[in-house]
């Protein structure tokens, strides 16, 4: 018999034939010729491998008569979905329904609209990044925000670096390299496996016998309870002054306003830390402050000047995009009465539970219909967290939707598959597993219509216990 007829692989269409199909002609338009050819080749190679495997399993004649040889259309659509999948960016927007407002793994603070606009303008244009307009000569990068930072914290001077880890690093490296740093054993924090205070101290070279500085650290991700007492910053400041060594207070999140106005516990403000006598205070830009990722050192002028002379400053500097967003964010603090309105972080933290509950009740039937009869959906009382080490023990009463498998015996695998289906949406929905349910804390859901439209594609086929 003719070999061409009996070999299924030989009966697949040629690359050129698939390329001429209407689907691929459109795909070339959208994704470019070389990407389209690549996708068609890969789909054909996969079909060829599959045909061969089937051929071996069934015998050649049978494979041919069972018609497993793909048509041009099917191959073209396969290539198109490959192209669509690969065109999706890796860094994608998600719905953060974890209940953690400043979620480090999901990018922490959402940026205020004013800051987004400022960053966009900085991206599109040449800007006065290091340019003194009045004198027409070279200026300093920090000038854009130094005045605002001093005004909002009461500090004499300020400098901006890549993040708070960098702020701590450059402060230690400048003031305590080759010397000793005195820090409470109870404050040797380790955050997210990557920011380990003992390691930052040794990297900064702060290990020698003479005292370079006293460090106070905000215990961001834990609290020591029981019969312990921490030394007040004011007492430490007096001690530091008596021995003529600087006191550096790493506030971590830091906040520029008193959060008790939002009904939250009091978190020490940067202005308070300065007033208590710290020589330098370090804090983050993308935690409670609600801006882009940045880190600050504010405090005494002559110490900031020494930091700015450290060559590390050049390695840790921020770019024009973040600096523009930061300046616009800080400006919002000049109008504290409208901070909740203008700054997403404050708005989400201050969002009343009643409003979230009403939202949950509205979404309940929509979600119940989409997940089908195998799951029960209920409005749930839950607790949001601030996240990123601010007020670690503080939770904020919130509400959401709890989705539970109806079958009592349903396994953890059913829940994991359910959570996976929500993560598989075009805009992934990230909830949290709690008490045998997938919990969607709705505190951070702002785009209700977008959430509903996105849900239309929910596919529960993969769940062991999918809708009947
Ligand atoms: C979060 C935190 C840091 C690290 O700040 P990044 O901005 O994430 O680099 C350092 N110290 C404390 C106390 C923190 O809470």
Image: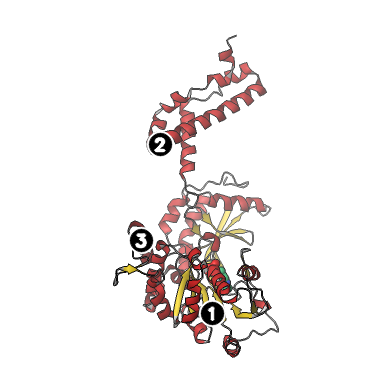
Give the residue at the far top of this rendering: 1
Q: Nearer the viewer, residue 166 or 242?
A: 242
Q: Where's residue 308, x and y in %?
A: 48, 72
Element on which disc 1 rests = loop
User: Pointer 1 and pointer 3: residues touching (CB < 8 Å)?
Assistant: no
Note whether 440 is above or below 88 in the view shown: below
Label 1 or label 3, whichever lies nearer to me, is: 3
Q: Which mark is residue 265?
A: 1
Q: In this figure, which residue is indicated by the disc labeled 2? A: 32
The answer to which of 130 and 327 lies nearer the viewer is: 130
Which residue is located at x 37 percent, y 75 percent?
338
Q: How many marks?
A: 3
- Vertical relation: 341 (above or below) 95: below
Q: CA distance from mark 1 to mark 2?
A: 55 Å
Task: Name the residue that disc number 3 marks.
Answer: 122
Above or below, comparing residue 293 to residue 13 in the picture: below
CB of mark 2 near ligand 1 (< 8 Å): no
């Amino acid at each position: 018999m003719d070999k061409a007829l009996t070999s299924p692989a030989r009966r697949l269409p040629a690359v050129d034939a698939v390329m001429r199909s209407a689907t691929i002609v459109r795909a070339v338009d959208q994704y470019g010729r070389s990407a389209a050819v690549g996708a068609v080749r890969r789909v054909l190679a996969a079909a060829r491998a599959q045909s061969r495997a089937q051929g071996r399993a069934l015998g050649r004649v049978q494979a041919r008569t069972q018609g497993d040889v793909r048509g041009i259309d099917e191959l073209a659509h396969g290539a198109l979905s490959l192209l669509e999948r690969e065109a999706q960016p890796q860094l994608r927007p998600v719905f953060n329904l974890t209940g953690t407002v400043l979620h480090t793994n999901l990018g922490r603070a959402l940026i205020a609209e004013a800051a987004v606009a400022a960053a966009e303008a900085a991206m599109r244009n040449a800007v006065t990044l290091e340019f003194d307009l009045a004198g027409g000569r070279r200026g300093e990068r920090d000038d854009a925000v130094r005045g605002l930072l001093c005004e909002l914290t009461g500090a004499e001077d300020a400098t901006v670096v890549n993040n708070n880890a960098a702020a701590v690093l450059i402060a230690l490296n400048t003031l305590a390299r080759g010397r000793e740093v005195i820090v409470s054993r109870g404050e040797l924090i380790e955050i997210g496996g990557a920011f380990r205070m003992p390691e930052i101290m040794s990297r900064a070279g702060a290990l020698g016998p003479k005292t370079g500085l006293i460090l106070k650290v905000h215990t961001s991700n834990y609290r020591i309870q029981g019969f312990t007492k921490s030394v007040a910053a004011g007492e430490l400041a007096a001690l530091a002054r008596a021995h003529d060594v600087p006191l550096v207070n790493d506030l971590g999140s830091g906040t520029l306003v008193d959060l008790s106005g939002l009904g939250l516990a009091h978190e020490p403000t940067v202005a308070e830390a300065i007033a208590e006598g710290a020589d330098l205070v370090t804090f983050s830009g993308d935690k409670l402050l609600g801006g882009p990722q940045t880190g600050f050192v504010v405090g005494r002028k002559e110490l900031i000047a020494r930091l700015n002379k450290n060559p590390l400053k050049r390695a840790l500097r921020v770019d024009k995009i973040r600096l523009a967003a930061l300046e616009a964010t800080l400006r919002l603090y000049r109008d504290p009465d409208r901070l909740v309105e203008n700054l997403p972080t404050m708005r989400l933290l201050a969002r009343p539970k009643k409003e979230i509950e009403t939202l949950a009740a509205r979404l309940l039937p929509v979600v119940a219909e989409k997940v089908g009869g195998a799951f029960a959906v209920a409005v749930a009382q839950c607790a949001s967290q601030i996240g990123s080490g601010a007020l670690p023990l503080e939770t904020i009463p919130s509400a959401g939707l709890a989705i539970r498998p109806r079958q009592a015996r349903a396994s953890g695998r059913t829940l994991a598959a359910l959570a996976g289906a929500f993560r598989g949406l075009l805009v992934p929905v990230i909830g949290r597993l709690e008490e045998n349910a997938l919990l969607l804390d709705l505190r951070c859901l702002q785009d209700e219509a977008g959430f509903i439209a996105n849900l239309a594609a929910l596919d529960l086929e993969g769940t062991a216990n999918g809708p009947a």
